[in-house]
């Protein structure tokens, strides 16, 4: 079949890399793709915001399936439009994508179907929100309802900080319409982990668990980023916790949506807090995580395109999905100034020196200039290593990171360390 990956970041590079290995894929496209993705796919320069042009192109080329990487086109209805033109899509429709696109929608659904998550209230009135903060006290979490590129959440340690966040979102409109409605929720305590699942509308097949590292500096210090590294599987998600997440979180959500008349197809990403009372939902995403994808997909044994097509067609079965008995660690190399800014045009050297086996370099933000890769974004590369166990995967990833260089590079030195603590 002909498959098009929509997007051009590290997650999409990983999706394209894995899809290119699928025996069922005859031709792979990437819209818009990237310089690195052009090594495995034909890149087509169409803007992600031009849903009509994307779906028209897919129709014209006889593309069988779109695999949508980022959340924005999904929340804007790319899947609905593609389906109306007879294209199969891996990625939820607009109604289902509200699980990520509206935190109020997701929280209300979780409440209705008794899915464990932080206690909350939602507000469209700033004064009412502030009164609630005073009543509840700190620490407390303030979230913009809509998409805010991962920046719409403030974990406030004091009431003043929480009130400042309400003002910024509701009065100064720093996130535009996304902050017109806010959720204020209980601050949960525990270790975070993610469990992504393939979903075909009714059947849910969870992937292996993963753990992201959101802060820029070691020991989870400094400002939040898009993610500085990930590893899989995450030992904090024990078999018992995994079962609980499947039964108490993923299934009630997919079934609950169905009862609301909404079919969820694609990847459902559960961001979890493993609390003393068991796993609770921090957030849902309606697509693969970045950089979790870079750690999870290298461990998938099987034909990703077939799994995705089954999700799109409602024919997914658990026996399509198998995992290698191994571990993966992805270390992100970010550019100078990230996350506040990014530095473009720095020459990347050493890519040729990387191991050819069990090490993959996924490009998040690079461009090609005079036949050389240069930095072109905040997160630049994700270096993933696969090994029989987590310790060796971490060592191998860092050994290969050392061979790559660009000016101002920022790398955390403790990706996977939390996982090792659990194994001790
Ligand atoms: P992204 O899209 O980048 O994953 P987001 O903007 O959707 O992020 P969340 O994932 O909901 O935001 O929250 C960001 C981070 O804030 C979480 O990873 C977690 O560390 C923290 N957080 C969110 N909600 C809570 C909560 N209720 N209790 C404690 N920490 C929380």
Image: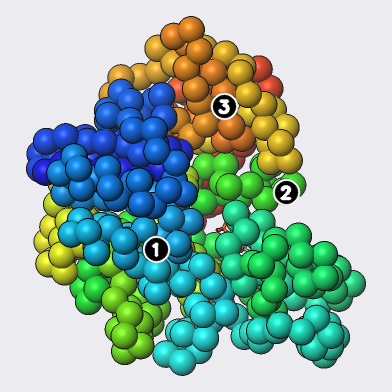
Residue for badge 1:
77
Question: Dot 2 corresponds to which residue?
Answer: 223
Q: Position of residue 33 (x, y in %)?
A: 38, 34
Of mark 1 and mark 3, the one earlier in the sequence is 1
Residue shown at 81% from the left, 77% from the top: 138
Do the numbered discs 1 and 3 sit on residues whose CB atoms are within 8 Å? no
Along the viewing direction, whichever of 344 and 113 lies nearer the viewer: 344
Q: Are marks 2 and 1 in contact (CB under 8 Å)?
A: no
* Horizontal arrangement in the rendering, residue 37 relative to residue 416 (left or right): left
Which quarter of the figure is the N terminus placed in? top left
| Neighbourhood count class around disc 1 (C-alpha, 10 Å): few under 14, some 14–19, many 20 upward | some
Q: Is residue 206 visible?
A: no
Q: In terms of secondary structure, where does tag 2 sit?
A: strand
**Dot 3 and dot 2 residues touching (CB under 8 Å):** no
What is the distance, in whole Å, between disc 3 and disc 2 at their CAs? 21 Å
Residue 362 location, x and y as percent?
Answer: 41, 32
Indicate which label's residue lies in the foreground, 1 or 3: 1
| Mark 2 or mark 1, earlier in chain | 1
First in sequence: mark 3 or mark 2? Answer: 2
Q: What is the number of the mark on residue 376?
A: 3
Q: Quadrant of ligand 1?
A: bottom right
């Amino acid at each position: 079949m002909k498959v098009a990956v929509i997007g051009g970041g590290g997650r999409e590079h990983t999706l394209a890399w894995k899809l290119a290995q699928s025996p069922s894929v005859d031709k792979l496209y990437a819209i818009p793709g990237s310089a690195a993705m052009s090594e495995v796919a034909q890149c087509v320069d169409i803007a992600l915001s031009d849903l009509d042009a994307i779906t028209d192109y897919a129709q014209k080329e006889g593309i069988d399936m779109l695999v949508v990487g980022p959340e924005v086109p999904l929340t804007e209805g790319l899947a609905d439009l593609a389906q109306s033109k007879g294209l199969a899509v891996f990625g939820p429709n607009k109604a289902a994508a509200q699980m990520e696109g509206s935190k109020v929608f997701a929280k209300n659904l979780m409440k209705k179907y008794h899915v464990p998550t932080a206690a909350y209230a939602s507000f469209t009135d700033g004064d009412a929100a502030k009164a609630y903060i005073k009543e509840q006290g700190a620490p407390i979490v303030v979230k913009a309802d809509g998409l805010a590129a991962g920046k719409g959440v403030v974990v406030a340690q004091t009431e003043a900080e929480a009130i400042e966040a309400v003002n910024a979102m509701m009065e100064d409109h720093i996130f535009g319409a996304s902050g017109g409605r806010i959720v204020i929720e209980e601050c949960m305590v525990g270790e975070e982990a993610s469990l992504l699942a393939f979903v075909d509308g009714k059947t849910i097949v969870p992937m292996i668990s993963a753990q992201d590292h959101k802060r820029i500096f070691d020991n989870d210090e400094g400002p939040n980023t898009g993610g500085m590294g990930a590893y899989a599987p995450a030992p904090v998600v024990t078999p018992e916790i995994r079962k609980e997440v499947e039964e108490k979180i993923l299934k009630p959500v997919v079934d609950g949506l169905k009862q609301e008349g909404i079919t969820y197809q694609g990847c459902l990403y559960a961001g979890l807090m493993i609390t003393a009372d068991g796993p609770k939902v921090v957030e849902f995403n309606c697509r693969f995580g970045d950089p979790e994808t870079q750690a999870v997909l290298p461990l998938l044994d099987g034909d990703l395109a077939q799994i995705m097509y089954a999700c799109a067609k409602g024919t997914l079965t658990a026996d399509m999905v198998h995992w290698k008995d191994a571990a993966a660690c992805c270390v992100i190399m970010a550019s100078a100034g990230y996350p506040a800014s990014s530095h473009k045009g720095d020459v990347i050297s050493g890519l040729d020196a990387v191991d050819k086996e069990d090490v993959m370099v996924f490009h998040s933000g690079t461009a090609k200039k005079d036949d050389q890769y240069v930095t072109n974004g905040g997160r630049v590369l994700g270096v993933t290593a696969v090994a029989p166990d987590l310790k060796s995967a971490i060592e191998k990833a860092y050994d290969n990171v050392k061979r790559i260089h660009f000016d101002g590079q920022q790398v955390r030195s403790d990706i996977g360390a939390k996982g090792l603590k659990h194994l001790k």
